[in-house]
Amino acid sequence: MIEYKRYTLSNGLRVLLHHDPSTSMAAVNVLYDVGSKDEDPHLTGFAHLFEHLMFGGSIHVSSYDEPLQRIGAQNNAFTSTDITNYYITLPKDNLETALWLESDRMLSLAFTENSLEVQRKVVIEEFKQRYLNQPYGDVWLLLRPLVYQVHPYQWATIGKEISHIEQAEMSQVKAFFNKHYNPSNAILSIAGGIDMDQTIAWVEKWFGGIAAGEKYHRQLPEEPAQLAERQLTVYRDVPQDAIYVAYRMPGKYTPEYYLADLISDLLSRGNSSRFEQALREPNSPFTSLEAYVTGEIEYGLFMIQAKLSEGTQPQDAMEALYRMLNQVAEKECEERELQKLKNKLGFLYEYNRTSVLNKAMGLAQGELHQTANLINEEFSRYEQISPSAMKAYAHQLFQASNRSVLYYLKNKQS
Amino acid sequence: MITPDRINGPLTHQIGSIQWTQPQVRSLANDAMVYCLGGLDVDVVKIELIFPAGTKYHKNLSVGSFTQQLLKEGTVRQDSSTFNDAIDYYGAFVSVETDRDYLTISVFCRTAFVHPVMALVHEMIMEPRFDADLLEIKKRNSIQNLLTNRKKVAFQSRVGLIGAVLGEQHYYGRISDTSDMQQVERADLVAFHAAHYFKSPPRVIVAGKITPDVNRSIEEFVGSLPVTSAYSFQKLATQTTAGIHRRPLEGAIQQSIRLGKLTIGPSHADATALDVAITALGGYFGSRLMDNLRERNGFTYGVHMSIDQFQEGAMISMHTELGKEYCDDALREIDLEFEKFLSEGISEDELQTVKNYLCGSLVKEADGSIAQSELLRFRLLNGLPDNAHEQVTHKIQHLSVAEVNAVAQKYLQRDSFVTVIAG
């Protein structure tokens, strides 16, 4: 059980504190309820570019990183389709410095032209390094628009194309900040060897005076139901054919999410899982095969990615794959197999408690959805799942009309 | 409400001293040394067994690598599926990893299941099945992975760098090619396992929650591992080929630049000062190279400099990936930063920041017994005393500008580095 206290400041900032007496570290996590789904379709990649600009100095402090390095802190951030998340770990005695820096950049950024120009170039290099200059790197750039026709999940966090990042202007940066980087749109969580009373006093001191700003009300287009299988075939300079199958499913924290997550574990977690054992069959059509759920908030995807062994025809590989999925949909797994999956998850939940940063992030993510207490409740949602519920959901999930398939094939000459 | 001083920020405090847990050390019936770091209140234990059975002990590096890959694939008594199902059923994670020097088996589990899990680990070490069909599958998959990696500029520059700095024929300087993989047969695995897994007892690091059951399981299943006669190993001398090495890769839109050179190990008197100098030049987000290449010029997503440690040596390396159009400018800026670092030296202020950054990192790396077990592993494998990390902290805090500058002059001359450009 992870004990925590919850506060809401008068400006709407939600605050979660967790005391862990076993550590001399503290983790500070600031989650902003803004992701690439909140972007203008003509200016994609902006939430992530903005994340870079959050390190370019704030209204009163010219360097964000330098004061943190001086107190032995480490920090980073990530942007997803749903959220932008900033975090710091540091020796607990200097916790207040972290609150100073986080509050100042929530108050206002410095908005220097130079920072925009440099970070624009850095993000373009990140785009190339991670998506364009890697074998199979552009998979998500292809798959997202295949699955989503109207919802903003149709573009990746990095953006649809480099030109969008090239075109970003300072006026848009400021507007984005004013719209999304408000206390009412953020969750601050702090975990570690902290003094709870002192910490909330500091939070009030540094964050309490920030104006609430205008509350952003999200209105995203609804993705229509998918009625038929979609396919896309591309040829690239890669050594091996690959196939990516995406089944649409509900978002994170829904009952279906937990069912789908356990189905993906059944197929793919641990060496004794069904996919791993299939990879060990002589003449397996696959050299790698994995399943996972993506876990976005609005809608999710049940993903399967496969690399095919030399000489295997994609159609034959697909048939072998669908046979395995049908088994899950048509025959209940044994109680023991399901218990095995729950035991593995139980260990992971226990192990995660050894990290203050994991705890701080977990509290904030639960709070964003509904309640920070999800961090304590989630495991029981898995524990309640039965073999018959898994089978029934697999039957619904693995319909041909519910999937999009990307055939990522090697050029004939390579 | 108190009005905060946003210009100056709050008062800061000296980074507090680390609470080091001293390992409890004992030996088992077969002379295996066990190092225990207890005190975790979460019900998790980590048991690490370190064998001197890395891939360098065979002229074909793939032999050790496939022996490791096949180790977890079933035993004489149970096939891969049954064996792995048993481990997974206990919710345990057992990983088998190898590098050039060591084979490491790591077990993570709830303390209630430690006895049956360690029984399985014992069976795996003593009676691996080494299934010939599975070996063929692993060979095929490894070859495919290698072909994919060859399309990556970072992989190409890494291969180029270790070859140039350590020697293309050296066990630290080469990687397996497809024919090495192709040649491996089941008999090679059986022979490698027999020759190297039992030549000396493993070192055992236990961290987390240590219950009587944990100790009993280690006595029973690690203390009973046999130890055969010692094995003589012919060390090779490394051989550096200086200069600039280019590895073109068709179709690449970015290039990967790496610099590297041989250097001193962690027990050398200059090691701490060198660590500080490398951190200042390229080892953290506020470093000179990061500031120049990323934060001022926007040439790259990142640049990093660090020391790679081997049992028989160490290598300084720097790495960055950037657009082809920036490559020449970036190389010039890298040269300038080295030159400036050596001619002007580190400043008091910069040194203080690096010291605090490094001490803060160490606080994080020492947070809890599982984290401390990683540091303990580093000390054990490098023959450092129990208090080595305390000494390092003390030494970092007392280093002078002059000491860091002297070490930089000695070890960080730009022309002493090999340069590799891939892409």
Image: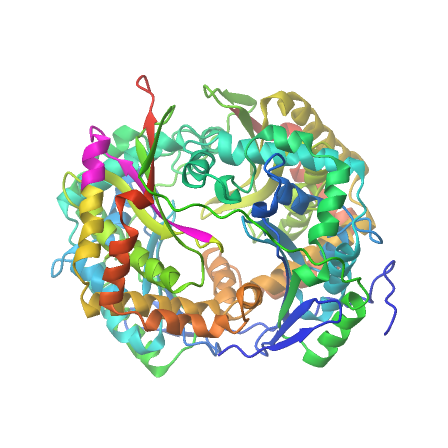
Q: Is residue A224 visible?
A: yes
Instruction: Say above or below: B420 vs B36.
Output: above
The C terminus of chain A lies in quadrant: top left
Q: Give residue A129's position: percent from left, percent from top.
A: 53, 33
Q: Quadrant of residue B112?
A: bottom left
Q: Give residue A158's position: percent from left, percent from top.
A: 56, 39
Q: Give residue B298's position: percent from left, percent from top.
A: 68, 33
Instruction: Say above or below: B260 vs A189.
Output: above
Judging depth in this view, the residue of B260 and A240 nearest the camera is A240
Residue that protrudes farthest toward the top in the picture: A413
User: Does residue A47 appear left or right of residue A295 in this picture?
Assistant: right
Residue A317 sits inside the magenta stretch = yes
Colouring mode (rainbow / by chain / secondary structure / one colour) = rainbow
What residue is shown at x 55% (from left), y 26% (from top)? B255
Residue that protrudes farthest toward the bottom in the picture: B212
Q: Give residue A140's position: percent from left, percent from top.
A: 45, 38
Q: What span is in magenta?
A: A299-319
User: Does residue A25 appear left or right of residue B296 in this picture?
Assistant: left
Q: Quadrant of residue A199?
A: bottom right
Number of marks in the image? 0
Judging depth in this view, the residue of A274 and A254 nearest the camera is A254
Q: Is residue B31 visible?
A: no
Residue A34 sits inside the magenta stretch = no
Judging depth in this view, the residue of A309 and A294 nearest the camera is A294
